[in-house]
Amino acid sequence: MGAAKALRHASVRRGARQPDPNSFANNQRRYEHFMSLARNAASSGDLIEAENFYQHAKHYLRKMQD
């Protein structure tokens, strides 16, 4: 096996161990993360930043519902 082919093969194996970015569990984790950030921003009085985080959370909520 050539060096370039071995390198491509190794990168495929490493990539297979990464979590699926579209999995329900990953989307749920991201949703909870952005909701936490939004709550923290809102409690500190930064409503614009909170709205930004809420919009990110809403995106992951929609992905979970698909």
Image (cartoon, grey):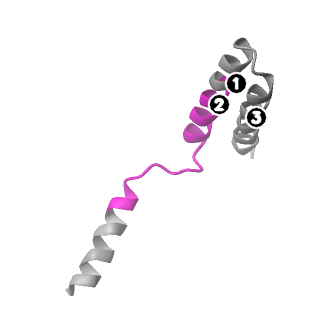
The answer to which image quadrant residue 6 occupies is: bottom left
Residue position for label 2: 34
Asked if the residue at tag 2 contacts the one at tag 1, i.e. Cβ–Cβ closer than 8 Å, the answer is yes
| Image vertical order of residue 53 relative to residue 46, above or below | below
As drawn, the label of residue 38 is: 1
Q: Which residues are magenta?
A: 14-35
Say whether residue 23 is left or right of residue 1. Answer: right
Label annotation for residue 52: 3
Residue 29 lies in the magenta stretch:
yes
40 and 28: which is toward the camera: 40
Distance of mark 3 from mark 2, alpha carbons? 9 Å
Task: Check the image and report above or below for 21 versus 46.
Answer: below
Q: CA distance from mark 1 to mark 3?
A: 8 Å
Amino acid type for the residue under numbered disc 3:
Asn
| Image quarter of the N terminus | bottom left
Q: Which amino acid type is shown beneath numbered disc 2?
A: Phe
Task: Say whether disc 1 or disc 3 marks the residue closer to the N-terminus.
Answer: 1
Eyeballing the image, is 3 above or below 50? below
Residue at the far top: name it: 43
Decide: marks 3, 2 in contact (CB < 8 A)? no
Residue 37 horizontal/vertical position (percent) = 64, 25
